[in-house]
Amino acid sequence: MRLWSSPLLLVMALLSGLGDARLVVTERAKVDQKIEALSEGDALQLQKQRSWVRDHYDTAAKDRYDTLEGKLVLLDTILRNNWVEPNETWKLQSLGVTFGDALAQELKLRWVAVEDQYGRDPALHDQGTTIVVFPVTSISKRVEGAMLSTFGASSERLAKGSLARGLNRLPPTLTEIFKANPTGDAGL
């Protein structure tokens, strides 16, 4: 059963769950965007970032990444153990790719490329709608300039927003990042 029967419900859930929604949900009507399939280069970049995260599992356990829980537990483990420094943008954005994979898996979203006046970025698209979500920078924007170990301890923000049943089980470390800096402005 599709959890989000209406694009409006998805937008409302994302907005209520993330405060000012710097996970970034946009409507094409508000920003002139071109949404297209990932190029071979785009797909290769996402795969490299996805592999960096997945390779934290040992060889025998890599198939765990295929599950929603496996992705979220892996994100939680990497963040809790401070395996990424706040200045390691590529690695933080790799975690964003994994977070995007979890969103895509749970919400049936599709990875696309979005080109607008700011450039070209990978994004998730709810097919048949103008809803676009940019998860790649969702973690890095909240962590850069902050210490990973200083995040608060609450997951209410995402849970109350009910992004999805599976994301209500989001590991505390990931929700702490969003709680500590919901706007993604690194305190600026």
Image: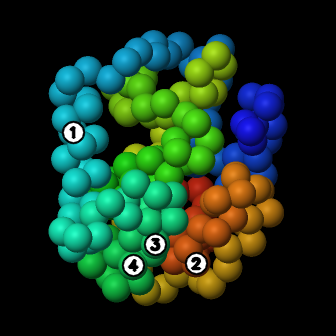
Q: Which mark is residue 172?
A: 2
Q: Amino acid at mark 2?
A: Pro
Secondary element type, mark 1: helix
- The answer to whether residue 64 is above or below residue 85 is above
Q: Looking at the image, which residue sits at the far front?
A: 60
- Near mark 3 (Cα within 10 A), the count class, few <14, some 14-19 or many ≥20, is many
Identify whether 165 is placed above or below 100: below
Q: Earlier in the sequence, mark 1 or mark 3?
A: 1
Say if mark 3 contacts mark 4, CB within 8 Å.
yes
- Give me the C-alpha separation between circle 1 and circle 3: 23 Å
Classify mark 4: residues with Cα within 10 Å, few (<14), some (14-19) or many (20+): some
Quadrant containing the N terminus is: top right
Q: From the viewer's perspective, is 6 left or right of 152? A: right
Q: Is residue 116 left or right of residue 184?
A: left
Residue at 32% across / 82% down in the picture? 82
**Residue 97 visible in the shown view:** yes
Give the Cα distance between marks 2 and 3. Answer: 10 Å
Residue that badge 4 annotates: 77
Q: Amino acid at mark 4?
A: Thr
Residues at discs 1 and 3 in contact (Cβ within 8 Å): no
Q: Are marks 2 and 3 in contact (CB under 8 Å)?
A: no
Labels 2 and 1: the sequence-earlier one:
1
Side of 114 where 44 appears, left or right: left
Marked residue nearer the N-terminal end (4 or 1): 1
- Determine which residue is flagged by label 1: 45
Q: Residues within 10 Å of mark 1 (few under 14, many from 20)?
A: some
Q: Earlier in the sequence, mark 2 or mark 4?
A: 4
Q: Circle 3 is placed at which residue position?
A: 73
Q: In the displayed structure, does residue 127 sit left or right of residue 120?
A: right
